Amino acid sequence: MTKEELFENIKRKKSFLCVGLDTDLQKIPEHLFDSENAMFEFNKAIIDATADLCVAYKPNLAFYESVGLEGWKILEQTVDYIRTNYPDQFLIADAKRGDIGNTSKMYARTFFGNLDFDTVTVAPYMGEDSVTPFLSYEGKWVTLLALTSNKGAYDFQFIENKENGKKLYEQVLEQSKQWGNPDNMMYVVGATKAEMLKNIRQIIPDNFLLVPGIGAQGGSLEEVCKYGMNPHCGLLVNSSRAIIYADNSENFATIARQEAKKVQLEMEKFLQEFHII
């Protein structure tokens, strides 16, 4: 999917919501275990209930890998289901890969050659040669970790270079601009660091940002839009638990839709306020 196609979907749906498919067998409704494939049935119900309200889905690979080979089969089923029934969705593999070049080539083949994701989250710690293999696929994206929302982000990401005064995350942004461009590289920036988006936008004004952390993690959508939105929206804001686990009864999908609708309506308000729609 191109940047222009993604932006058109945002305008058409009046939404820049990404729904995280962090599917945990210990949290899904009990009645689903009456079926042969509870995990996929959960995903399918959430997708059917929310597809017209969001522009992206983000399966978190850890939740699928944790159940072994069956989890990979469910991940493949989920991707195929979205591609077949909702082809306008932007698919993000939240895998946080990143290794030496030949290993990254295999990761890229996994997510782009076999599973047909649009992008994969990549850790930049090992540098350019660990990232560029993902950029070799036409029409695919890298989503690079830049500034995360977890407590441990302060262990490394805010370390200052004594020579130029720049923090590590700022150097990641500036250096990685030489590897990709706004048409094939976006960045993870946590919603709980929303006040720092103003500085980030000075470094990367045109790239899309994948912003986790609203909802259960307490990030403010208003602040994310205030500091991070650009003339082409430039945001994919993720919500996982607050939507998919809003209810664990037989009405879970209906309640999930209601929660997604609340977020979509708030997003529509900001898109109008910033004169994007």
Image (tube, helix red, strand yellow):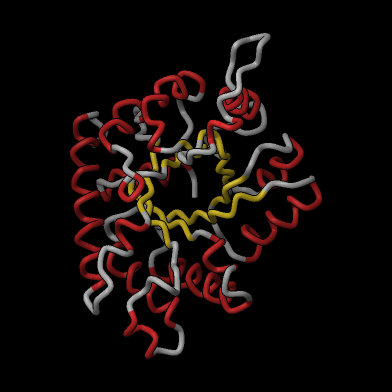
x and y percentages locating residue 63 in the rendered image? 52, 65
x and y percentages locating residue 51 in the rendered image? 32, 62
Who's the residue at 37% across and 25% down the image? Answer: 195
* Total marks placed: 0
**Residue 40 in the figure: left or right of residue 95:** left
94 to 6, vertically: above or below = below
Who's the residue at 70% across and 56% down the image? Answer: 107
**Residue 277 in the figure: left or right of residue 102:** left
x and y percentages locating residue 266 in the rendered image? 20, 43
Residue closest to the eye, 212 or 25: 25
- Where's the C terminus, which quadrant? top left
Who's the residue at 33% across and 77% down the image? Answer: 29
The image quarter in which residue 236 lies: top left
x and y percentages locating residue 214 in the rendered image? 33, 44
Residue closest to the eye, 180 or 139: 180
235 to 157, vertically: above or below = below
The image quarter in which residue 229 lies: top left
207 to 35, vertically: above or below = above
Who's the residue at 40% across and 57% down the image? Answer: 88
186 to 259, vertically: above or below = above
Residue closest to the eye, 261 or 140: 261
